[in-house]
């Protein structure tokens, strides 16, 4: 069955990863595909960017394809944010995937049903596909959260209208007590928002998370993980090394979805999710062996 919800696909310079995620989109067969691409940073990268864009030519189903390709390199912060501005100038709602976010097939049905069901629920601003601490025994299909995971997600134009890349609400918000919702992780959340506000990170998603939080927005998170991040490698923008957060297995979510009776964020879940995501990566076996040898040499 074809997917009625538009899919927005963000690509750059990794044709092999783009092809994997494109194949998942191809299996879902959306009626509309919006593709956003950044330009090369230097001449040697132009061929990779071109090969990546050529992956989209493999659309072989009934699909309207719209493209927004930049001739110059805008960087992560401005390419993704301007791309999403363009997406929501075209459509009212969208499922959003980057080139390294490989969805489990049921992710699309999960998003499509909930985008329609909560279309007019202003407080719900974000649908996530990622759950780093799965809750398989939860008696509903998903929970509500104040976190904003962006490895495979979906939203509406009405929510994206709150996006402010300059985070003008931050100076007022950080004097309020709402940040303490995040408990022991409040300082980590504060530091992420402050770093984005000071433009110390070339990223768009910290601003999106802040605008959701500052507007008391809620996120829907599936009880199990629906997205595998395949981009943790040397050519990643922010994900150059392997991490424990990309090792969570994906599962198919059962349909029809069972919805919670109340739209209340799960504070305990949010703290545990942040604790897990902020946990340092354990040292690799190779690194541990090297350290052992180094210490042995020093000793003897």
Image (cartoon, rainbow, N blue to C red):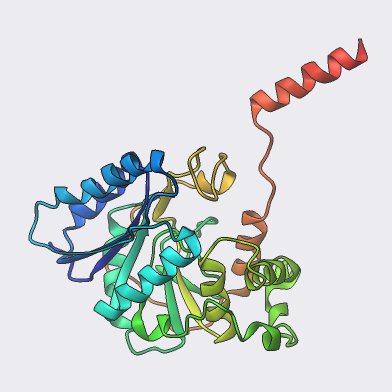
Kindly identify the residue that appears in the image at 70 percent across and 85 percent down.
171
- Residue 257 is left or right of residue 64, and the answer is right
Seen as rendered, the residue at the extreme front is 43
Kindly identify the residue that appears in the image at 67 percent across and 71 percent down.
198
Front residue of 205/71: it is 71
Residue 65 versus residue 118 in the image, above or below:
above
Seen as rendered, the residue at the extreme top is 300
Across and down, in percent, residue 295 comes to 85, 20
Q: Is residue 154 visible?
A: no
Front residue of 36/117: it is 36
Across and down, in percent, residue 9 comes to 31, 59
- Residue 214 is left or right of residue 152, and the answer is right
Quarter holding the C terminus is top right
Quarter holding the N terminus is bottom left
Q: Quadrant of residue 153?
A: bottom left
Kindly identify the residue that appears in the image at 47 percent across and 85 percent down.
162
Across and down, in percent, residue 53 comes to 26, 49
Residue 291 versus residue 47 in the image, above or below:
above
Kindly identify the residue that appears in the image at 43 percent across and 75 percent down.
126
Front residue of 67/268: it is 67
Across and down, in percent, residue 89 comes to 29, 80
Q: Is residue 258 visible?
A: yes
């Amino acid at each position: 069955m074809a997917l009625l919800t538009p899919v927005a696909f963000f690509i750059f310079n990794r044709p092999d990863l783009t092809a994997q995620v494109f194949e998942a989109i191809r299996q879902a067969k959306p009626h509309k595909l919006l593709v956003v691409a950044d330009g090369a940073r230097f001449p040697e990268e132009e061929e990779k960017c071109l090969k990546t864009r050529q992956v989209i030519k493999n659309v072989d189903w009934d699909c309207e394809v719209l493209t927004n390709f930049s001739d110059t390199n805008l960087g992560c912060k401005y390419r993704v944010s301007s791309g999403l501005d363009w997406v929501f100038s075209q459509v009212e709602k969208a499922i959003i995937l980057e080139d390294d976010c490989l969805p489990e097939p049921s992710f699309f049905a999960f998003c499509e049903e909930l985008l329609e069901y909560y279309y007019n629920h202003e407080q719900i601003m974000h649908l996530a596909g990622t759950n780093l601490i799965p809750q398989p025994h939860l008696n509903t299909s998903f929970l509500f959260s104040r976190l904003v995971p962006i490895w495979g997600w979906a939203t509406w134009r009405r929510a994206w209208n709150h996006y402010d890349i300059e985070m003008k609400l931050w100076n007022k918000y950080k004097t309020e007590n709402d940040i303490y919702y995040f408990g022991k992780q409040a300082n980590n959340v504060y530091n992420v928002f402050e770093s984005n506000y000071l433009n110390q990170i070339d990223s768009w998603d910290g601003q999106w998370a802040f605008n959701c939080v500052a507007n008391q927005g809620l996120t829907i998170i599936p009880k199990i993980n629906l997205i595998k991040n395949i981009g943790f490698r040397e050519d990643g923008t922010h994900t150059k090394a392997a991490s424990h957060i990309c090792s969570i297995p994906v599962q198919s979510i059962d349909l029809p979805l069972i919805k919670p009776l109340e739209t209340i964020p799960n504070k305990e879940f949010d703290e545990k999710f942040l604790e897990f995501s902020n946990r340092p990566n354990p040292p690799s076996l190779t690194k541990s062996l090297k350290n052992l040898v180094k210490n042995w040499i020093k000793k003897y």
